[in-house]
Image (cartoon, rainbow, N blue to C red):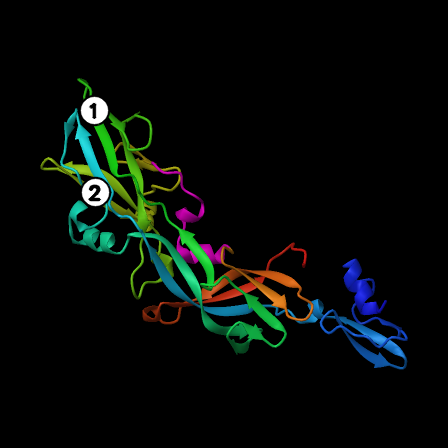
């Protein structure tokens, strides 16, 4: 058995990088498992995985909103058993005021994805496509490197009830939760994204159910706005003597911006050495958004820590 085949069969590396060993009679070599350089009857061992994977990868990505497929939910507020007029949960008809109309228009997204745009840098060396020298970039068919999910509402009818006691204590029953006193339920609405936006502002949008003139309406808040009011997801906070709480179970990622998701390593790619078939996972570290109007983001990836190569 050749040295190359023996190393691969055992899936171990019995010789250190750069070691000199006696050359066998057989001159069989399998490129990529190790490279050999004859020197006075010896072979210098150089493992492909030790040198060929880049220390860093920068990929150009494109921001791709994923719209809510079914935005037909209705919302209705009932006060002391009197029903206010129901309105669509999504769309400008459910909100009041110009700013909320703009937020509603761009927030009917159940997710935001970042797709590989086709070029980048391996250790500061430019490449196009999904291969560079001996390295292949492994991606799903749609080239997604990150998908950020948002909490949305899909029930046909969202009903919230308010009941006032003779002592004027308000008991609130939100669409999905239990009855609480003197509280303000906060519901997930969707992800905010529009052309030319900084990814620091691609965040969850939330709603509070209110009424006016016998009609239900929504007040919309961005994650950024709520944090400024010290209403911190997923725990909530106090505003105007009311305990604000988040009605939906929120993931940690839904409490952050798209920029935070990148910096926390949630974007991932896999590189494969074409000869040895060795795989290495890379996670996102930093980003750069040079031109907002382009909708493109450069993401820097580095090898994931504490991983075993396969």
Relative horizontal placement of residue 89, taking residue 62 as reference (left or right)? left
Residue 163 image label? 1
The residue range painted magenta reads 247-264
Q: In terms of image quadrants, where is residue 63?
A: bottom left
Whether residue 53 is situated above or below residue 180 in the rendered picture: below
Asked whether residue 11 appears in the rendered view, the answer is yes
Task: Mark 1: give few (<14), some (14-19) or many (20+) Cα within 10 Å.
Answer: some
Q: Secondary structure at mark 1?
A: strand
Find residue 64 and report its horizontal and vertical position in percent.
37, 62
Find residue 146 and report its horizontal and vertical position in percent.
46, 58
Whether residue 269 is situated above or below residue 275 in the rendered picture: above
Q: Secondary structure at mark 2?
A: strand
Whether residue 29 is situated above or below residue 65 in the rendered picture: below
- The residue closer to the viewer here, 182 or 75, is 75
Quadrant holding the N terminus: bottom right
Asked whether residue 16 appears in the rendered view, the answer is no
Residue 27 image label? none
- The residue closer to the viewer here, 288 or 144, is 144
Find residue 272 and report its horizontal and vertical position in percent.
62, 66
Query: Which residue is identified by label 2?
Result: 218
Relative horizontal placement of residue 155, taking residue 267 as reference (left or right)? left
Q: Is residue 289 magenta?
A: no
Q: Single out the residue that lies furthest toward the left.
A: 213
- The residue closer to the viewer here, 245 or 79, is 79
Please report the residue visible at 24 percent of the width from the left and 33 percent of the height from the top.
Answer: 159
Q: Single out the residue that lies furthest toward the top.
A: 166
Q: In terms of image quadrants, where is residue 283?
A: bottom right
Q: Is residue 259 magenta?
A: yes
Whether residue 92 is situated above or below residue 47 in the rendered picture: above
């Amino acid at each position: 058995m050749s040295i190359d085949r023996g190393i691969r069969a055992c899936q171990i590396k019995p010789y250190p990088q750069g070691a000199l060993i006696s050359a066998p009679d057989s001159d069989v070599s399998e490129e990529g498992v190790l490279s050999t350089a004859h020197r006075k009857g010896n072979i210098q061992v150089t493992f492909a995985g030790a040198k060929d994977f880049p220390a860093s990868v920068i990929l150009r990505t494109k921001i791709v909103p994923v719209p809510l497929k079914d935005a037909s939910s209705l919302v209705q507020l009932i006060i002391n058993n009197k029903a206010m007029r129901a309105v669509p949960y999504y769309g400008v008809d459910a909100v009041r005021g110009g700013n909320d109309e703009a937020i509603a228009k761009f927030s009917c997204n159940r997710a935001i994805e970042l797709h590989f745009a086709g070029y980048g840098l391996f250790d500061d060396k430019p490449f196009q496509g999904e291969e560079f020298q001996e390295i292949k970039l492994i991606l799903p068919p749609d080239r997604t490197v990150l998908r950020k999910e948002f909490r949305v509402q899909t029930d046909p009818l969202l009903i919230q009830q308010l009941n006032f006691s003779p002592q004027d204590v308000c008991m609130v029953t939100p669409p999905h939760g239990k009855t609480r006193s003197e509280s303000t339920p906060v519901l997930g609405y969707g992800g905010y994204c529009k052309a030319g936006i900084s990814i620091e502002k691609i965040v969850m949008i939330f709603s509070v159910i209110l009424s006016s003139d016998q009609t239900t309406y929504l007040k919309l808040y961005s994650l950024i706005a709520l944090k400024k009011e010290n209403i911190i997801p997923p725990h909530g906070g106090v505003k105007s003597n009311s305990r604000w709480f988040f009605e939906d179970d929120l993931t940690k990622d839904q409490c952050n911006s798209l920029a935070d998701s990148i910096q926390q390593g949630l974007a991932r790619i896999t590189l494969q050495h074409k000869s040895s078939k060795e795989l290495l996972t890379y996670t996102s570290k930093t980003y750069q958004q040079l031109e907002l109007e382009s909708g493109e983001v450069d993401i820097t990836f580095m090898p994931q820590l504490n991983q075993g190569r396969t």
